[in-house]
Image: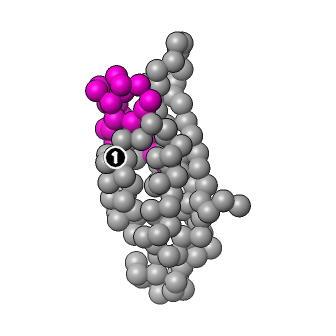
Amino acid sequence: MYVIRMKNCAFFARHGVLDEEETLGQRFYVDAELTVEPSQPLEEDSIAGTVDYGVAFDVIEKIVTGKRRLLIEALALEVAKALAARFQQIRQAEITIRKPNAPVRGVLDHVEVSVVWPRS
């Protein structure tokens, strides 16, 4: 087993509870930590035996820029499930989504949510 990490995948989307979040939209950042059991020995040096992270990026992008979600928690779970379904080699997917412009009264860097699939 080994881990593939994709960090700070950036997408413009319109997720959030408030109407203004849908109207204005904002950038969201996604990290994917994928625990992989290759279907072929790594010594074979074959993309067919592992997770193609270009395809994984496309899966993430389609979901994040697609249907609006009120909760980034639900969005993260959808991404994790989709990646695990697309790549049978994934044993666990931990998806973190950062929302830098969360509508709170105060100053913060970002709000961040992580979801692990399958649940331990």
**Residue 1 against residue 54 in the figure, above or below:** below
Q: Which residues are magenta?
A: 11-31
How many residues crowd mark 1 within 10 Å: few (<14), some (14–19), many (20+)? few
Instruction: State yes or no: residue 15 in magenta.
Output: yes
On the question of residue 30 being in view, the answer is yes
Q: Residue furthest top?
A: 105
Residue for badge 1: 67
The amino acid type, in three-letter code, at marker 1 is Lys
Q: Is residue 43 above or below residue 57?
A: below
Q: Is residue 5 visible?
A: no
- Residue 3 image point, x, y percent: 57, 64
User: Who's the residue at 54% across and 79% down the image?
Assistant: 38
For residue 116, side relative to residue 17 (left or right) = right
Q: Which residue reaches farthest left?
A: 23
Residue 114 in the image, given as x and y percentages of width and height: 58, 45
Residue 60 occupies quadrant: bottom left
The stretch drawn in magenta includes residue 89: no
Residue at point 47%, 69% (across, down): 85
x and y percentages locating residue 91 in the rendered image:
59, 70
What x and y, as percent, mark residue 51?
45, 71
Residue shown at 32% from the left, 54% from the top: 62
* Foreground residue among 48 and 102: 102
* Picture residue at 53% right of the left edge, 43% below the top: 73
Label 1 residue SS: loop
Foreground pick, 60 / 33 = 60
